[in-house]
Image (cartoon, coloured by chain):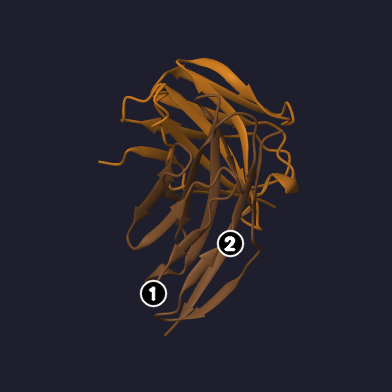
């Protein structure tokens, strides 16, 4: 069935370091792909999305490109801040309203 | 004005009790969901309703019963609570769009602790 696999955490970086969180998916058809972020004690918030191959989603300095050939949607940011510390979830949507999430990757950014 | 609101935010109860969590969305969305997040942050879909009709019912014990009185509300009732039910339960909503632009909007979560 459809699924999402993302790299295990925690990922610990120093402020201003480059971030990559890997995400790959398995799906029949052409799902939409998402990154959600969960700050401590809060619900998940949409960070960015891409609905078709080669689309690039971007928000708050984060980017991810929908790569159909490698079935990937890796999250990147050029310079992380302490305030980016959170848990990041990769997700896919298929069949209009079914959303499946990866296991989450915790990011710790140290000053 | 909160888009997806859940109550209560925290719930501590004894094993064997029955409890409910309520969810309301004011976004005009037609689909609502319950997700369970365990202590390792893994997020698992439990149920989904579209216009008050159950459309997703994953492998969940039948002690869990969702109820959607209208498309803006989705409640979760849990009977005979067990220790393993301790988790954070998230309500979410979305608007189905053929264009593919629909996204999930989450509530802040309800942390259930079963003693």
Residue visible at 58% across and 72% down in the picture: A11
Residue B11 visible within the image: no
Q: Colour of chain B?
A: orange
Q: Which chain is brown?
A: A
Label at residue A79: 1
Across and down, in percent, residue A16 comes to 39, 80
Q: Mark 1 falls on what kind of element?
A: loop
The one of A34 and B107 positioned closer to us in this rendering = A34
Residue visible at 49% across and 46% down in the picture: A66
Label at residue B13: none
Q: Earlier in the sequence, mark 2 or mark 1?
A: 1
Do the dots labelled 2 and 1 sit on one chain?
yes
Residue visible at 58% across and 61% down in the picture: A105
The residue pinned by badge 2 equals A105
- Name the chain letter of the residue that bears numbered label 2: A
> Seen in the image, is A17 located left or right of residue A10?
left
Location of residue B53 with respect to A86 vertically, above or below: above
């Amino acid at each position: 069935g459809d699924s999402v696999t993302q790299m295990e955490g925690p990922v610990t970086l120093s402020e201003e370091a480059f971030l990559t969180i890997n995400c790959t998916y398995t799906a029949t058809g052409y799902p939409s792909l998402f990154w959600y972020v969960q700050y401590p004690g809060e619900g998940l918030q949409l960070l960015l999305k891409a609905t078709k191959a080669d689309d690039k989603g971007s928000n708050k300095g984060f980017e991810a490109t929908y790569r159909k050939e490698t079935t990937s949607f890796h999250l990147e940011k050029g310079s992380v801040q302490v305030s980016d510390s959170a848990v990041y979830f990769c997700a896919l949507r298929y069949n209009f309203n079914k959303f499946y999430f990866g296991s989450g990757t915790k990011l710790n950014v140290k000053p | 004005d909160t888009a997806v609101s859940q109550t209560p935010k925290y719930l501590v109860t004894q094993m064997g009790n029955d409890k409910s969590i309520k969810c309301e969305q004011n976004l005009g969305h037609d689909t609502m969901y319950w997700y369970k997040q365990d202590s390792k942050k893994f997020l698992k879909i439990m149920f989904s309703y579209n216009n008050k009709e159950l459309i997703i019912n994953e492998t969940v014990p039948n002690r869990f019963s969702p109820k959607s009185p209208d498309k803006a509300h989705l409640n979760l009732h849990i009977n005979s609570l067990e220790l393993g039910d301790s988790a954070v339960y998230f309500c979410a909503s979305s608007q189905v769009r053929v264009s593919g632009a629909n996204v999930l909007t989450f509530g802040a979560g309800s942390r259930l602790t079963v003693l």
